[in-house]
Amino acid sequence: MVNKREKESDRESIDSKKHRKSNSSNSTEVPAKQVKVDVYANVIQFEEEESKKRSADVDADLFLETCEKLKTIFAEIAQLKTQNSSKAQEEIKAKRITGSFLFAQLKKLSRLDKVRLRAGRDALHKEKLTVDSNKLQLQNLLYEADHLRKEVQQCFQFKSQDEEIDLVDEQKFYEEAPETISRPEKTQNDEHARRLARLEWELHQRKELAAMCKTLQTAKESVAREIDSKTNRLQSLMPCLDQLLKSTRPLQDALEINIEKEWKTEKIARLLPRPLYVAYVNLSAYAEISNKLIDTRIVGDEDEAKELESTDKVENEGENAGDESDDAGDDDDDPENDGPHSSKKHHHRRQLSTVTTEVNVYKPHPLSITFKLPAAASNNGPTLSITFYFLPALRFVTVQTKLVDFETEGVAARDVLDPTKIMNCLLTNENDDNEVLHPKTKYTLHHLSLDPSTFFMKLGEHQLGKPFTWAQNLCGLNFIVSSKSTVSTFSNNEQTQETVPEIVEKMHTRLKARYQLYRQVLALEQLIGNGSKGAGTNAPSCILAQWSPITFVEYAERTLATSRFIDENLVTSNHLLYHAVLIRGSAKMDGFISVSPNFPAECPIWAITLNVNGSRLLSSNSNDIKEMEYWINSIESFKRNVSNVLILQLKRAMSSLDIFIETESIRLSSSSNEVKAEKTFLNVFRGRARSRPYKVIQNGGSVIYTQI
């Protein structure tokens, strides 16, 4: 605002000067030859020089002094105006003239101040321009210095592309490269020249290899065209072959040869995973040669298996390509360049990431194999259907079993032919579940937060069966190792062929033995409440009141009677366990029977407790019970009487109870009507141990009992 007013005052002063100039020019006649003078410019120049000669402080004092004079004149004029006289009027006029001069002087001082202000402003602007110019020049210099610093850093960090090229070593270079390229007289002493020569030799070799590659590519395309032509020719033969096959069907039917079915089966068999394929081929061959009753088939979705196979091929090709790129990257690494900057080299490496979820763990291969194993040649016995599944995520085989065209009867007998337990411990007496847990399976289960028991339980829930050790052996898998002993495994087809007959025979023997055991247990259930039925002429006096299955926990709860068998590992959770109750009068015998999974290789074991006369007798506190257990568990003709061994043992148990009660009555001289002497003894007691006569001796048409 001040600047605007100053400019307006300058403009008014200039206009007034121009007006005075015009007035003076009008009043004065200028000669025709007078030199034109710019009075305004001269005045401005004079005032500028005057402003330079005198300081602003002097002008400020002069300004104050002039103002004081004007005040005095104004006061005097005001006083004179009150006198109202002619003299006062003249003085007023004179003072007005003086005041006008003072006003002119104030204007001049104002102009001089403006001149000084404009000169200072111009000087300030000039200095600002100088400062801005210097600052801009400084910024340019700093930018150039930073740019040069970066250029220097890039030069220090520069790595030429030839450093990533794996060149031949110097000795081989001088041996193979021609002298026109190697120039040994120059390159041996000049490292840079030697590097250039080696690069030139590398370029020469690569050009030769490129030419060779082009030649081979041309040959490859030629071979591919030839293959395509032959493929088209073979495809054109397909209709002719189909027609030929249709025309030969009557001959196939006449000769009972089903070639098409075999071809289709072989085509599907190629889609099986390797373990199932090994099992299928060996089982089919064994069934064809040795046992025609074994029926082996492939079950599953063929289309899904083809899709899975194509997916696996694509993944394998990708993995192989990744491996090749890794190998090439490793070959390009130069050990001489190892240092702080070696990690900056870009090597494309394949990272294997196996995403395993709980759903994938329980997802089997789309195809499975099933073979049916009959217990007997006739159709009277059960037929066991065994299905093999392969779990790709865990790389082992599971087995699901079930009975076909056979309905079990009874309560205790039904557990004998339980499909989920019938093939337990086929090779060993140990539980097969944990034997398949090789490290990969354990790590996978740990990753999914699954313990083995939960995992095997979920396998059953998904209808996948159990991963038996013998199933892995049958399929040629060789990673199974038991916790206590190394289980024989097989990795090649010859060893698997040797194993198949052994395993199949054991399976057939197991099924046949279980069917015999089933019939025995079923017969024992029918004897409940009638002790003399089926026992021959020497009928026992006691009766079979109960024959029921029990669990291993219930068996183990009878600590005093059964603990020694469990401690000696004669009875495990895989055994079939039963509870028999024999009653005669007030006497009661509890028999706890354990049947081994390897029956009939091992005889059933009885553990006995006897409640008589208010006392509870066990083998641990009574020699009589110990002898009774020995007599029941030691059947000399056990292996010749596999079909009725339990009935024989029950008969011995019943006769032993009768003998104990009758001899005990004799010992106590009891005349109770409850006990009637029905047995004939040579000696009631014998020896220092007072042994009782449990052993049976035929005496013509009668039976005599004597000590063991």
Image (cartoon, rainbow, N blue to C red):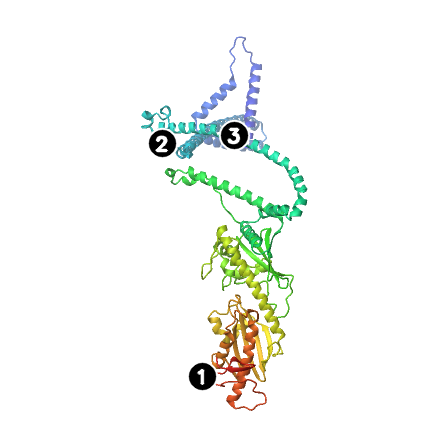
> Measured along the vertical axis of the image, is residue 535 above or below residue 248?
below
Residue assigned mark 3: 219
Q: Residue 621: which numbered mark, if any?
A: none
Work out whether residue 539 or residue 85 is closer to the camera in this orientation and state it. 539
Q: Position of residue 245 (x, y in %)?
A: 65, 42
User: Marks 2 and 3, how far apart in space?
Assistant: 31 Å
Residue with the most extreme top position? 33
Label 1: few (<14), some or many (≥20) within 10 Å? few
Question: Is there any visible trace of residue 513 in the rendered image?
Answer: yes
**Which amino acid does the dot numbered 2 rest on?**
Lys
Q: Mark 1: which secondary structure? A: loop
Q: Which quadrant of the view contains residue 413?
A: bottom right
Work out whether residue 564 or residue 11 is closer to the camera in this orientation and state it. 564
Which callout, 2 or 1, points at the residue further toward the start of the chain? 2
Work out whether residue 77 or residue 586 is closer to the camera in this orientation and state it. 586
**Which amino acid does the dot numbered 1 rest on?**
Ala
> Measured along the vertical axis of the image, is residue 215 above or below residue 239?
above
